[in-house]
Image: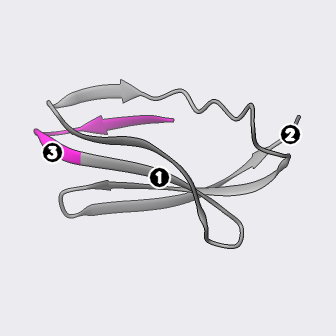
């Protein structure tokens, strides 16, 4: 998951299953401005649709992804 910050911000990235239950929290840190990439290791998850949400200051983005094994 790749994201870019225009200024220093607290960033939270969480992964949810299709039912809305939180599966994992990938990031929960204050980050400097710049481009970042987080690797999502899904070794213990089954194939299916997952939702990830990125929150940074006043910005919120939610996207869906499909995991195929």
Query: Residue under circle 1?
Result: 14
Compared across the picture, whether 48 is left or right of 36 comes to: right
Q: Where is residue 30 in the image (x, y as percent from the top left)?
A: 17, 39
Residue 68, numbered circle: 2
Measure the C-alpha gap from mark 3 to mark 1.
16 Å
Q: Is the magenta stretch mostly helix, strand or loop?
A: strand
Compared across the picture, whether 26 is left or right of 17 comes to: left
Ranked by sequence position, the earlier of labels 3 and 1 is: 3
Q: Which residue is drawn at 20% across and 64% down?
A: 58
Q: Which residue is drawn at 33% across and 50% down?
A: 12
Q: Where is residue 67 in the image (x, y as percent from the top left)?
A: 78, 43
Query: Residue under circle 3?
Result: 9
Measure the C-alpha gap from mark 2 to mark 3.
32 Å
Q: Give the range drawn in magenta.
A: 1-10
Do callouts 2 and 1 mark residues in contact (Cβ within 8 Å)?
Answer: no
28 lies above or below 32: below
Ranked by sequence position, the earlier of labels 2 and 1 is: 1
């Amino acid at each position: 998951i790749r994201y870019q910050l225009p200024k220093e911000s607290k960033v939270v990235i969480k992964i949810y299953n299709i039912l809305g239950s939180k599966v994992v929290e990938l990031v929960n840190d204050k980050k400097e401005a710049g481009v970042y990439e987080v690797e999502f290791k899904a070794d213990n998850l089954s194939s299916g649709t997952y939702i990830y949400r990125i929150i940074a200051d006043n910005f919120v983005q939610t996207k869906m992804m499909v995991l195929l094994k």
